[in-house]
Image: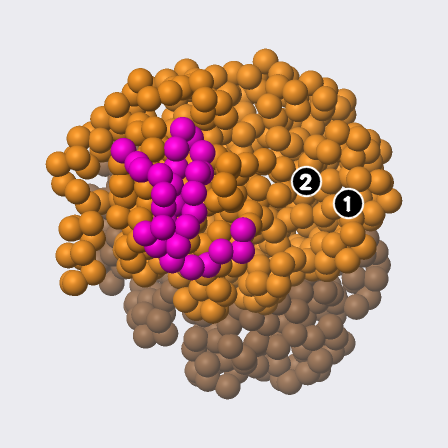
Chain colours: A orange, B brown
Amino acid sequence: MARKMRALIRIVPERETRSYSSLRKVARAPKPRAESPKSKMPNNKSKPASLLIKGGHVIDPASKIDAPMDVLLRDGHVVEVTPPNKIRGSAEEKFDARGLIVAPGFIDLHVHLREPGQSYKETIASGTAAAAAGGFTSVCCMPNTSPVLDSQEWVNWVRQPERGAVVNVFPVAAATNGSKGAVLTDFRGLQRAGAVAVTDDGKPILDNDTMRECLRLSGELSFPVVQHAEDTRQTEGCPMNDGPTSFRLGLHGWKTSAESSIVDRDVQLAQRIPNSRLHVAHLSAADSLKAVRRGKRSRAHVTCEVTPHHFTLTDEAVGDYNTNCKMNPPLRSAADIESLIVALGDGTVDAIATDHAPHASHEKQVEFERAAFGITGLETALGLAITKLHRDHRLPLARIVELLTSGPARVFDLRGRGSLARGSFADVTIFDPKKRWTFDVSKSRSLSRNSPFDGWQLTGKAVATIVTGRIVHRDG
Amino acid sequence: MNKGARGSLLDIEHLEAPEILKILRSARRMNPQRPRPLLRGKRVILLFYEPSTRTRSSFEVAAKSMGAMTVLVQSSGSSIEKGESLLDTGYTLRSVGADIIVIRHPLAGAPRLMAEHLDIPIVNAGDGMHEHPSQGLLDAYTILKHKKAFKGLHISIIGDIFHSRVARSSCHLLTKLGAKITLCGPPEFVPEVAATLATGLQVTRHIEEAARGADVLMLLRVQKERLAGMKLRLEDYIARYQMTMHRLKMAKRDAIVMHPGPIIRGLELTGEVADSPQSAIVEEVRNGVPTRMAILARAVGRA
């Protein structure tokens, strides 16, 4: 109760209501790219040129800070991070962060924003609004759109202000034309256009020679190749993990070897190709971790991400054909979860990524085997990470922040992101690690409703999301 | 989650033992020769997305003999061919005035999906590899005609368990009623995980072990294409897993042989076994009608 009162007092009422309502409008209106903060200066009233975040507890793993600190943002950058009340500069706006954690803006390496072509599921505007609500200031969007993001034109299109992105959007381009697995795309050109990595996500790069060539180019350009590790020759007609639940439901089981065999091959290739950069998307199986560890030990540039649903739910959650528990890769066993949580703690895993995959209800309210793979995840990621990893498994909060900030920033070389070091972009996520709340999917900012976490009680929630100095989301 | 309208029969897994016994008792009271008009004025829609002889005809006979009007809807020659979704087909049939939908579908979970969204009872007539509850019930009914009780019975299920919806329903049903079940077949047909389906299931690779001392031998159809897919030679399968008179003699003297059909003589069983006095295969088909009468009567709350 007392906490609630304080939370209410914290917000300077008059000013807040004004900036909040104008923010909502701005959120939908086109705005310039966040990468060039200098170009859009404070002609916009809702965006203060300077913002002082006072009284919070800063966790910035990149700068090895875990202490009470004040943070001053000015002109889209971090200007000062000092012990309480030691900020020298002045600010036009203040944010009272007492009782809250102030962290670098969260980065999601793996989201599906569905544009171009599938705006009935999600748009860049709605998907990034969901990201902001979940505390993410940057999202990396996957290229399996319609058409596939396999050209500079489409990468540019995604980055245009007309898309109405509320947070930073970093496109990941297709690795092969149309993601068909045959002809490589123009990595150099895509990188120049602003793509941060390449992948054929949704599909694996199966062919050995194609993967070898991708990795060779990735080394040359320092351009990560993201592998969706699924040997589709083993998974045809398999809608869920192989185990007691798939047997009980009469469904063909998807074995973990379909994932680990590809990870194994890719790590071997990465070890042999100098400077190559391999990133394993949504790693789900304990077996796959072995290869990743081997790669890291050998100093190959191998990274991986794990989704909140894979460290939270087992395949038993499918229950009686709950299509909101159908995803690719599928939910695994309790033993896999245990291994994933160990790997999240010990540094084997570099990032928590949501694999936010919105689908319309008519794509989920069908027979289980016909249902689309994937769930939304941007708004529940932080709550699940704190609830499951911190509260239940005692992972330090700082490690969770690392997995959401400096970890992913390193994977895709997002310079000036994932850190509150002076001069970094003013991307900040302020969250309450103790806040208990209930996720209500009907109130989601996403256009889609396909979440298995509807009605879940979670601990930990983003209170404010700041993108290049501008508050784009505020809770309550 | 919505469990479906009262009277739905979606699977055996979620039925309690007393409920199962209630259906079996009701089936015993059903007399296909002198049926009571429990379904008078009711519309039963038989929605069949897969070919079927036994199940379809016995549901139809069961429904009609109790005074219901039946309509058969098949995937070919209906809007299903035009790409209508399962739920939209369900809403359509509900609007036409269906009181009960009996559904056979190649995809597991289809009846449950329909039940979750419609307010009328849905009866599962077989969904993919999941369950075939009416077959499980008629098998139990058949066993009860030969044996006094289920408790302590040794029942062996032999053949392609993995692909069998009948096996899944029978495993749930018979273990709930206290029988001991042994599953027998090669690992491709009987993976180790099969033992997790219900408590007290055993797995063996040796048909002699499955046959020895058994009260009931339930055989399952083996599809030659599936043997080819797993590189198991047909002759090897027959040598190791075919039910022969010699193997049948290892079972209890009053053991019965069952098979949900269609049987393939010379593959999972010899012709002599199929025609032996211990065979209850033809009787099973006959028992399908009273069992399904009980299921439909239960669906409208008249059982």
Write the residue at 31% across / 49% down: A54
Q: Is residue A133 above or below residue B28?
A: above
Please identify the quarter of the rendering in which residue A18 is found: top left
Q: Position of residue B41 (x, y in %)?
A: 20, 43
Q: Is residue A325 magenta?
A: no
Task: Classify mark 2: helix, strand or loop.
Answer: strand
B277 vs A234: above or below: below
Where does label 1 land, which residue? A266
Q: Residue furthest right?
A: A272
Q: Amino acid at mark 1?
A: Asp
Whole-percent x, y for residue A200 in the image: 65, 32
User: Residues under labels 1 and 2: Cα distance?
Assistant: 8 Å
Q: Position of residue A224 (x, y in %)?
A: 69, 36
User: x%, y% of residue A465?
Assistant: 36, 40
Q: Residue at x 35, y 39 (%)?
A: A89
Q: Is residue A86 above or below residue B147?
A: above
Q: Are marks 1 and 2 in contact (CB under 8 Å)?
A: yes
Q: Which residue is mark 2?
A: A227
Chain letter of the residue carrying label 2: A
Q: Which residues are magenta?
A: A63-92
Three-letter code, disc 2: Gln
